[in-house]
Image: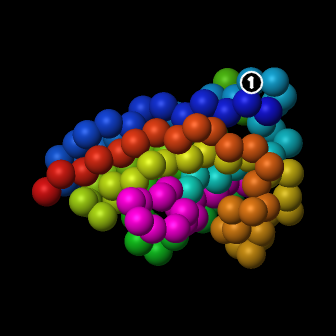
Amino acid sequence: VQLQAFGGGMVQAGGSLRLSCAASGRTLSSYTMGWFRQAPGKEREFVAAIRRNGDSTDYVDSVKGRFTISRDNNKNTVYLQMNSLKPEDTAVYYCAAAPIYYSRSNYSTSSNYDYWGHGTLVTVSS
């Protein structure tokens, strides 16, 4: 599976961005999908995950109520809608795919993901 993330950019605090992650090579419907981010000088952290059929999602506490993960398996694409952005959301955002059972201990762990996109930079100014 090849993943390509795009949609990042620079936005002011309070603004919105929508990230997309397009897949090729294999259908995404077989994978739990996740978004991770890595800020400068920090470790990569889990942001959001969505079950294969899209009927369950989960988020890190810091983005709950502001970010929404979704997927369109027909388009082989996963999205991350980010609203009310804060400067602390500034990071490179990565999408990833994992053929794993959907549980928090699984989807929140980056090492469980087999495929990664190249990342897209989100910069939020104050």
Q: Is residue 78 visible?
A: no
Report the residue that reaches farthest toward the front. 41
Label 1 environment density (alpha carbons within 10 Å; few <14, some 14–19, many ≥20): few
Q: Horizontally, is 95 left or right of 38 in the view?
A: right
Name the quarter where the C terminus is drawn: bottom left
Could you tell me which residue is drawn at 39 percent across and 37 percent down?
Answer: 8
Magenta residues span 37-53
The answer to whether 68 is drawn above or below residue 58 in the figure is above
Color encoding of the figure: rainbow
40 drawn magenta: yes
Element assignment for label 1: strand
41 drawn magenta: yes
Could you tell me which residue is drawn at 49 percent across and 48 percent down?
Answer: 93
Q: Horizontally, is 53 left or right of 59 in the view?
A: right
Residue 87 placement (x, y as % from top left): 24, 60
- Kind of residue indicated by mark 1: Ser
In which image quadrant can residue 118 be found? top right
Name the quarter where the N terminus is drawn: top right
* 57 vs 110, nearest the viewer: 110
Residue 86 placement (x, y as % from top left): 26, 60
Query: Which residue lies under the disc numbered 1?
Result: 24
Could you tell me which residue is drawn at 23 percent across and 42 percent down?
Answer: 11
Q: Horizontally, is 73 left or right of 38 in the view?
A: right
Residue 121 placement (x, y as % from top left): 40, 42
In which image quadrant can residue 27 be found? top right
The answer to whether 22 is drawn above or below residue 100 in the figure is above
Q: Horizontally, is 53 left or right of 45 in the view?
A: right
Residue 31 placement (x, y as % from top left): 80, 46
Could you tell me which residue is drawn at 25 percent across and 51 percent down?
Answer: 124
The answer to whether 61 is drawn above or below residue 10 in the figure is below
* 9 vs 57, nearest the viewer: 9
Q: Is residue 99 visible?
A: yes
